[in-house]
Image (cartoon, helix red, strand yellow):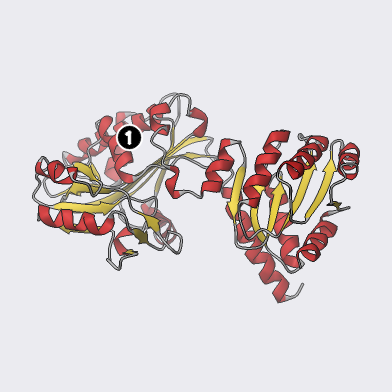
Amino acid sequence: MSNIIWSKLSTARHAANNLLKSQRRYLNLLEYQSKGLLEESGVAIQRFRVLEGSQDDLKVLDQFKVPEYVVKAQILAGGRGKGHFSNGFKGGVHITKNADEVLSLVDKMVGQKLITNQTPQDGILVKKVMVASSVNIVRETYLCIVMDRESNGPVLVASPAGGMDIEAVAEETPDKIKKVPIDISKGLTLDECKEIAEFLEFKGNLVAKAADEIQKLWKLFLKVDAVQIEINPLAETDDGQVISVDAKLNFDDNAQFRQKDIFNMDDASESDPREVEAAKYNLNYVAMDGNIGCLVNGAGLAMATMDIIKLHGSSPANFLDVGGNVKEDQVLRAFQILLSDKNVKGILVNVFGGIVNCATIANGIVNASKTINLKVPLVVRLEGTNVVEAKRILKESGLPIKSASDLDDAAQTIVAAIQ
């Protein structure tokens, strides 16, 4: 293949990989919410309050007197300290000893979009600001408990080199990483926690304190059905404390029925509303920047569909994965979500019927096309279970639906149809 084609396919696969990673819209909590869960479980953290740029902020601060304040904008993205706001104000993290300045900082943050290296280009709107008591950190360590496929269960990852990119630590100084698989039936014993604390280079009476914090984090991991609790840094302070300064928690969506209070904290305002809408119907949506809407079943087909569209000179506007148990009404919702993107000039359906019945997809396509009075070109490639019946349904529908014999034919047809 030519370098140009390889470049196109590389770009396509990068975007498709994002689809692979987003087969479910996982619950993410803001920093103050995660710290609230830690605090409820007795984990040592900085004292904090949450301000919203309202008249109540002054009252909250009057009851929260500390020697020095850390003021942090709350969004689901990293790099906040080095970010900048849409109003020109720089930095999503500030330190001050003046309560009046806290209010001024909050006023400059709330209602503005914070732009960092991890946000969309136009940033994310800040609605809340966490104000915490500043602590004097002597030393920073890293601790994480995470579900690990290779270990078939939870693993604790620890490093005395905290406060930095743990991937870089693992690559440059692998001897500073300790990985401890956890027997789910036995949990973490106090002796194991002390060994980890010593590896983290805590000394004297801080070993026992650090071990206690590690045990509390493990108990929290179990209690909330977490798939990850990352503390970076787990810090030693100048007054001899061990505290979790920054926390990231992720949860098992299958445990939502047990963790209703936690999942009720979910704020979907930072997510693409089309992703949120798709999730309501057990669909997975990924937005892109092209002009062909793609309805597929499975990430593998998504990648192949993207590759072939790019190869024929166009690009996808979005992908919507309907999965393997799709029903006719979900197909209608899928079409509505795909078409909510105004850049969509045509739709390509690429479905392989394994678990899913192709006739179900065909009936869904016909009903959706009639319900929404589809105005853009539609090309359908179906293969697998009951495909003959499915093609009959499409042919006899009387609708201008173009059936394709294979994926290459489908891509060529839809690209030509929108030009």
Quarter of the view holding residue 86:
bottom left
Q: Is residue 247 left or right of residue 172?
A: left
Quarter of the view holding residue 366:
top right
Q: Is residue 343 left or right of residue 205?
A: right
What residue lies at 21% left-to-right and 48% top-to-bottom?
A: 131
Residue 351 rendering spot, x and y as whole percentages: 77, 45
Instruction: Count residues near mark 1 (Cα–Cα under 10 Å), then give few for <14, some for 14-19, many for 20+.
Output: many
Q: Nearer the viewer, residue 303 or 194?
A: 303
Which quadrant of the rendered structure holds the N terminus?
Answer: bottom right
Q: Is residue 164 left or right of residue 104?
A: right
Q: Is residue 104 left or right of residue 141?
A: left
Residue 298 rendering spot, x and y as whole percentages: 69, 44
Disc 1 target residue: 217
What residue lies at 45% left-to-right and 28% top-to-bottom?
A: 184
The reply to whether residue 323 is visible in this rendering is: no
| Residue furthest to the bottom | 3
As helix, strand or loop, the secondary structure at mark 1 comes to: helix
Q: Amino acid at mark 1?
A: Leu
Residue 222 rendering spot, x and y as whole percentages: 40, 29
The reply to whether residue 146 is visible in this rendering is: yes
